[in-house]
Amino acid sequence: MTRPAKDFFAPLAVGAPAPPREIPARPSRAIHFFDPGNAKMAAKVPDMVGTVDVLLGNLEDAVKAENKEKSRQGLVDIGKATDFGPTQFWTRINSLDSPWVLDDLTTLVPEIGDKLDVIMVPKVQGAEDIHYVDRLLAQLEAKAGLDRPILVHAILETARGVANIEEICAASPRMQGLSLGPADLAADRRMKTTRVGGGHPGYLVRQDPVRDDLGVPQYDSQRTSYQQDLWHYTIARMVDACAMHGIYPYYGPFGDIKDTVACEDQFRNAFLLGCVGAWSLHPAQITIANKVFSPSVEDVAHARRVIAAMGDGTGAVMIDGKMEDDASVKQCQVMVALAEELAAIDPELKKQYDAISADGEVQA
Ligand SMILES: CC(=O)SCCNC(=O)CCNC(=O)[C@H](O)C(C)(C)COP(=O)(O)OP(=O)(O)OC[C@H]1O[C@@H](n2cnc3c(N)ncnc32)[C@H](O)[C@@H]1OP(=O)(O)O
Ligand SMILES: O=CC(=O)O
Ligand SMILES: [Mg+2]
């Protein structure tokens, strides 16, 4: 059950920092995963600061059971030694039913809680999982004397989690967002796939058969098929639940590292539907996510043009043969607000967006 409104923003432990009233819209186009116990990956982290919006030290899946402690200690060392500047520092802890998670939280919060922005919790099933983490974090924050609450991000990767999506988003004022976890979700749903995210050539619709002059369908005629998006339903649910609760939705992992084209397509679908970012598993995917989750110059120029033409934002105007009104101007405001947030942290994008005048003209 959700706490009564009067208690919702009260700290859950005496001396813990007050939970946030609003989740800041910090750019997080790529959440870049690294294994802090892998010396080669860990060595790259300091140079990645400033080149990626989020650096996430992963302690869960993809870290071997025998390396859990090494990875946790590696994360503490990196957290202490690194000045993250504009880059957010997140971790993915082990799942709540694992033998490692308690040590994850009781080690990380006192050691590097002042550096951690967000804790990603895997395999969240319902509000009860968030309540558990919420209370424990408050106790640990109070004990460590932290003055800023650590935010919580849930991975949607079980059928039960999807069914309970709204209550998960509403479970705590710490909730920062949700990521799609397509690999675990596929297993939990008993989907007949063997991939980490992305599409599947078997999931398609086919054009109707051509009919002969008598209207008889020719089933062996040449027919185009169209691959469909396995993840559309879940992402759409996630986007609505997050928007309703003022938190942020993300596409998760795309495992086919070499298929940069399909990765870009999958990320772009998520961007168009309302996601703010995706995971990057390999440095090559940071570039893809940064590109896809940044509005194009053309879109920002069009948006500024509509906003300028719409004046106080009410009424209807024609631009390039299309009607724009109170509703489309709001979409344009979303686009321009995102461009402004990104320009504040990305000098290259700032240059590109600054070349667009307030009424949408792009200067050469
Ligand atoms: C379903 C889920 O839970 S998804 C989330 C969990 N999974 C992960 O976090 C996976 C993270 N990524 C990885 O483990 C690796 O990228 C792999 C296994 C996919 C590929 O690794 P490799 O085969 O070493 O890739 P590749 O040879 O292209 O690496 C090139 C360099 O980039 C480094 N590198 C690879 N991935 C990363 C990363 N995520 N972060 C930082 N550096 C990396 C490699 O160490 C290598 O360094 P080197 O040039 O000093 O030797
Ligand atoms: O953790 C991510 C997933 O796809 O599973
Ligand atoms: Mg998973």
Image: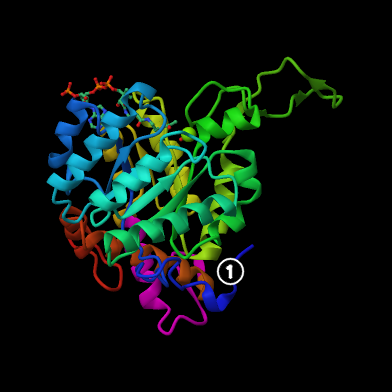
* Image spot of residue 283 (x, y percent): 25, 33
Residue at image location 31% in from the left, 25% down from the top: 67
Above/below status of 319 relative to 53: below
In front: 105, or 349?
105
Q: Farthest top residue? A: 220
* Image spot of residue 14 (x, y percent): 39, 70
Residue at image location 35% in from the left, 47% down from the top: 106
Q: In this view of the protein, can residue 275 be seen by the observer?
A: no
Above/below status of 90 relative to 9: above
Residue at image location 28% in from the left, 59% down from the top: 144
For label 1, the SS is loop
* Image spot of residue 22 (x, y percent): 41, 70
Q: Residue 301 sits in which quadrant?
A: bottom left
Above/below status of 126 relative to 355: above
Q: In this view of the protein, can residue 149 be seen by the observer?
A: yes
Q: Residue 334 sits in which quadrant?
A: bottom left
Colour approach in the figure:
rainbow
Is 307 inside the magenta-drawn segment? yes
Q: Is residue 145 left or right of residue 40?
A: right
Give the residue type that dot 1 points to.
Arg
In front: 215, or 140?
140
Is 245 inside the magenta-drawn segment? no
In front: 113, or 338?
113
Mark 1 — residue? 3
Residue at image location 38% in from the left, 63% down from the top: 335
Q: Is residue 336 left or right of residue 4?
A: left
* Image spot of residue 10 (x, y percent): 46, 73
Q: In the rendered view of the protein, which quadrant contains the C terminus?
A: bottom left
Q: Count neighbours of disc 1 (C-alpha within 10 A) and say few if under 14, some if 14 to 19, many if 20 or more.
A: few
Q: Which residues are magenta?
A: 298-323
